[in-house]
Amino acid sequence: MLIKRPKGTQDILPSVVNKWKAVEETVSQAAEQFGFREIRTPVFEETGLYVRSVGDTSDVVTKEMYTVSSKGDDTFTLRPEGTAGVIRAMLENGIMNEGFPRKVYYIIPCYRHEKPQAGRYREFRQFGVEMAGSASPYADAEIILLAATVLDGCGLENVELHLNSIGCPECREKYRSALREYFEPHKDELCPTCNERLGKNPMRLLDCKSPICKEIAKDAPIITDYLCDGCREHFEKLRKILDGYEIKYILDPKIVRGLDYYTRTVFEFISNGIGAQGTVCGGGRYDGLISELGGQPTPALGFGMGLERLILTMESEGCEFPPAKTPDLYIAPMGERAQEKAALLCDAVRRAGYAAEFDIIGRGLKPQMRYADKIKAKFVCVLGDNELDSGEAKLKNMRTGDEKAFKLEEFIGEFHNLLIEELFGTGLGDALADSIGDLPANTVPPETNGRN
RNA sequence: GUGGGUAUAGCGUAGUUGGUUAACGCGUCAGAUUGUGGUUCUGAAGACCGUCGGUUCGAGUCCGACUAUCCACCCCA
């Protein structure tokens, strides 16, 4: 009986790794362009970190954490999200003292014990950014603009930005009471879950999907009418800045983040092509979090972007991914003597900076050619007794079928020239000219090419 | 945690009102006169039909339970 992967996890197989690499590349390039630097923190943290930051009543903390007790009394939790650990690391290492604004990004796996569904996994990968030290709406705009830049860089066109402000704790309390007042008369009509939520967290009533609750919620008071002067001005300024960038957004009073630490600006980028779990990116401001975790009160904000949802959206929109790299050369030896030579030749070619393979199964020529074709090798060199005896072999261009003879001792130089020619011929050369041009055009023969 | 769908070779599928050796495509491997790929042709390997139990002379096919998986609620990335 084979052991199977844990529920809600996925194997990212070689055939799709190119998609992940492309996305990771796009994402980190954009982040660095905006002045964010990468940070890497542990996959597990003390459980208390998440209880304090994410909130002890949130779903994530109450029912979705993977928590283990270690040998001592400590309990640890596999990170369910990125912000808490990153803020912890910044505080612990004094990074906050290096001057504001501090801007970091990360690409990390996260873990939540949820029931898997389309776009929802128990292990999922997230691209996240955090910015600390600015209370300005320009900071909010930077974060949103970065997310928009990333999505744009991935080629997405149909992802909507939903924007809201949930105010500071003071305006939120006022708003909560207003909601309770509004819903109280309809108490008996609400669905059971909403009825419960009325007391605990009335803001959750707003995005209930039950038609009855939806109908009742239609005329409910709106948070933005209850913002204090400071919060309202902040939100208005942010909207003005976004307008200046020509970033389209939908004012959505229903955006209510489930993590307790959010204040003021909250936003989601939502795709409608990937099923019910369409939030590709979610984030906002969390001005109270850093002091909650023991630091000096510092305004901060950030977002998390689900990478498998991002890829799903790209697939649903028909985005192209760059193809995986293919070998430059396959060497097809025939017989033991040739295989020995092929091994050395292959090694020399690799040390010259190319991707090369040779037969290590001992197959006949025909299967080797099929294999070379399958792995999309750009060139093939057949090595048999004839070549070894004469010291002369041929390089075959697999795209054109052309063959060119060369002396074995000049192999690397010849191969380099042919490869350049081929790449320019297919139009790839222009892009690659710089990097490849630097590679050695004429290396010493493999026999005398000792390793350091 | 609550619903609903699905379960046949590595992958994608067919399997007639229950009836003998479970079929096909892709993939894999090997051949098609001397040492050259993609196309074509031929052949081979590969499935205890998710698991357990029931109905029946007989179950891939009907029934039940369990498990897995997918989708939805919930929640979120």
Image (spheres, rainbow, N blue to C red):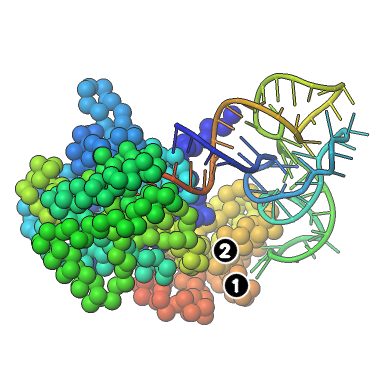
Residue A362 percent across, percent down from the top left = 63, 49
Horizontal and vertical percent position of residue A428: 47, 76
Q: Is residue A219 left or right of residue A285?
A: right
- Return the chain for callout 1: A
Does residue A112 appear in the picture of this structure? no
Cα separation between marks 1 and 2: 9 Å
Residue type, label 1: Arg
Label 2, on which residue? A376
Quarter-of-image position of residue A61: top left
Q: Mark 1 vs mark 2: which is more N-terminal?
A: 2
Q: Nearer the viewer, residue A7 or A3?
A: A7
What is the quadrant of the C terminus of chain A in the image? bottom left
What SS does tag 2 mark?
loop
Q: Amino acid at mark 2?
A: Lys
Going 20% across and 73% down the picture, which residue do you hit?
Answer: A240
Query: Residue under mark 2: which chain is it in?
Result: A
Residue A399 circle label: 1
Residue shown at 22% from the left, 22% from the top: A72
Name the image quarter holding residue A165: bottom left
* Vertical order, A429 against A272 (above or below): below
